[in-house]
Image (cartoon, grey):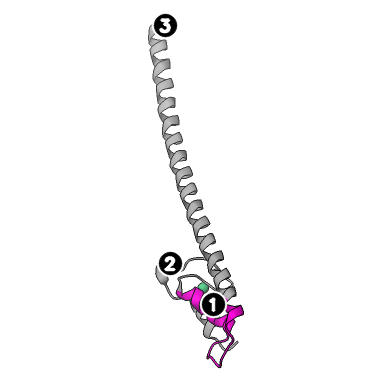
Amino acid sequence: MEKKELYDGFLVLEKHAQQMLKEIAAMKDDMAETLERNAELEIENKHLRQHLAELEKDDNKTSDGGVELSKSKQNLESLYNEGFHVCPMFYGQRRVNDEPCAFCLDIIYGEN
Ligand SMILES: [Zn+2]
C-alpha cells in the first residue's frame, strides 16, 4: 500500500513537472518574441532618426524655389513614401504593406 502511494505521488509530481516545462517553454517563446520585436523597433527608431536628421540637413541647405508642396510637407511626403505614417494618430509607425492612410494623405495634400 505504501509503495502504491509513493508511486502515485511520483505520477502526480511528474505531471506537475511536465506542466511546468510546458509553461516555461511558452514563456521562453513569449520572451523571444518580445526581444525580437524590441530589436525591430530599435532598428526602426534608429532609421527614423537618421532619416529625420537627413531631412533637417537638406532643409537647411536647399531654398524653396516655387515648389508645389511646402518644404515641411515635402519632408512628410518623403517619410510617407518610405513607408511611415506621418499622421498624428500613427506617427512614426510603419505602414503595414504600404497600405494607404487617409489621415497621412490629408496631412500631406490636404488644404491645411
Ligand atoms: Zn497615417
- Label 3: element kind: helix
Q: Earlier in the sequence, mark 3 or mark 2?
A: 3
In the image, taking residue 1 as reference, residue 59 lies left or right, namely right
Front position in the image: 29 or 41: 41
> Where is residue 80 shown, x and y percent of the image?
49, 75
Dots 1 and 3: beta carbons under 8 Å?
A: no
The residue that appears at 39% across and 16% down in the rendered structure is 8
Amino acid, disc 2: Val
Badge 1: few (under 14), some or many (20 or more) residues near its Cα, within 10 Å? Answer: many
> Where is residue 27 shown, x and y percent of the image?
47, 39
Image vertical order of residue 21 relative to residue 63, above or below = above
In the image, taking residue 61 as reference, residue 19 lies left or right, namely left
- Foreground mark, 1 or 3? 1
Q: Earlier in the sequence, mark 1 or mark 3?
A: 3
Residue 102: mark: none
Q: Number of marks in the image?
A: 3
Residue 76: mark: 1
Amino acid, disc 3: Glu
- Label 1: element kind: helix
